[in-house]
Image (cartoon, rainbow, N blue to C red):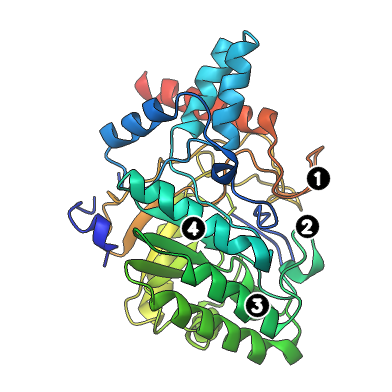
Amino acid sequence: MLPLALAGLALALATVPLAGCSVAGPADSAPESVRGAAPGAEQAAARAVRNETPFWVDPGSAAARQVTRWEREGRGDDAKLLRRISEQPLAVWPSGSEEQVGADVRETMRRAGAAGQTAVLVAYNIPNRDCGQHSAGGAADREAYLRWIGAFADNIEGGEALVILEPDAVPHMADGCTPEEIRAERQEMLGEAVLRLKRRPGVRVYLDAGNAAWNHDTGSLARRLGESGMNEADGFALNVSNFQSTRATRAYGHELSRLLGGKHFVVDTSRNGNGPLAGDDATWCNPPGRALGAPPSTRTGDELIDALLWIKRPGDSDGQCRGGPAAGTWWPEYALGLARSAADNDRRADR
């Protein structure tokens, strides 16, 4: 089932953290949209409408700002390539601060609502996040997390939202990375988060389930998802911040859906245009030679896939590997590489 704003659109389709590895989301910084729109925002919004995406295009994203900067610096060709990112709807990762998260969500909803589009939000603040790796952090404890997710949920108003809930949180329980003594509490927090979010009108919730090359024991993963609020959620999310192909992700999602009573799912295609990097122990962290994947859409050609999304904001670093900045930090040259590879793929397809 699609969000209410998506109901009139037909469904048509057009990464790998190793155990204990980060998905590198920018959870600890306010969304770019809160800090103001870049010039050309109206044009970007108009193009989004023409492309018939139901999801909100953030006119203040780091990519949009970089386009403007490069145009001023005379890097017109690079700016044109980067529009492949700036003109697409990207998920917003609100702040992990209890004091800031409500304002971030409220401002995102205000802007998305004004555009008549659906906001894509990522809730990423579970305690003991990422097993202490590149995206370590999260709320201090259960009470702090419930206050945070409450503020997150309470400020979803004035429009519709699709929420990706806690990347890595369930998969890390399934792969053994999360200590046994905190798993029951984590499952309780996730279940409460689903309920809090689902109380809001027009909200769809997708609980993160990792990616096709992570947890091969789908039975164990399905049990963990079921114990973490899946029954009340609208479905699950796959490939967040990763690079697995849509074909592999679709097959994995169908297997997991079968174990979950037919639950639907969404797929992060933000950087999977060339699939995963082979033959490297850190295939998930800023791998070279990757490409943007299929643009966000509800036309998936698969009755179980509700949407293709750009959940990981292309160009945000996975962590301090391969010369990258801290996890979640905008890295323009990496973004340019993703866009250039996608353009090369398009040219080859046209031959």
Q: Count neighbours of disc 1 (C-alpha within 10 A) and say few if under 14, some if 14 to 19, many if 20 or more.
A: some
Q: Which mark is residue 106?
A: 4
Q: Which mark is residue 321?
A: 1
Return the residue nearer the eye: 218 or 239. Answer: 239
Q: Residue at x 29, y 62 (%)?
A: 3
Return the residue nearer the eye: 131 or 73. Answer: 73
Decide if residue 208 is in sight here: no
* 304 left or right, relative to 89: left
Q: Secondary structure at mark 1?
A: loop
Q: Count neighbours of disc 3 (C-alpha within 10 A) and say few if under 14, some if 14 to 19, many if 20 or more.
A: many
Q: CA distance from mark 3 to mark 1?
A: 29 Å
- Residue to which mark 2 is pinned: 134
Q: Residue at x 55, y 35 (%)?
A: 291
Q: Secondary structure at mark 2?
A: loop
> Mark 2 or 3 closer to N-term?
2
Q: Residue at x 39, y 51 (%)?
A: 308
Q: Residue at x 66, y 65 (%)?
A: 99
Residue at the top extreme of this rendering:
74
Name the front one of labels 2 and 3.
3
Q: CA distance from mark 1 to mark 2?
A: 9 Å
Name the front one of labels 4 and 1.
4
Decide if residue 229 is in sight here: yes
Tags 4 and 1 touching, CB below 8 Å = no
Return the residue nearer the eye: 290 or 326. Answer: 326
The amino acid at mark 2 is His
- Residue to which mark 3 is pinned: 145
Q: CA distance from mark 2 to mark 4?
A: 28 Å
Q: CA distance from mark 2 to mark 3?
A: 20 Å
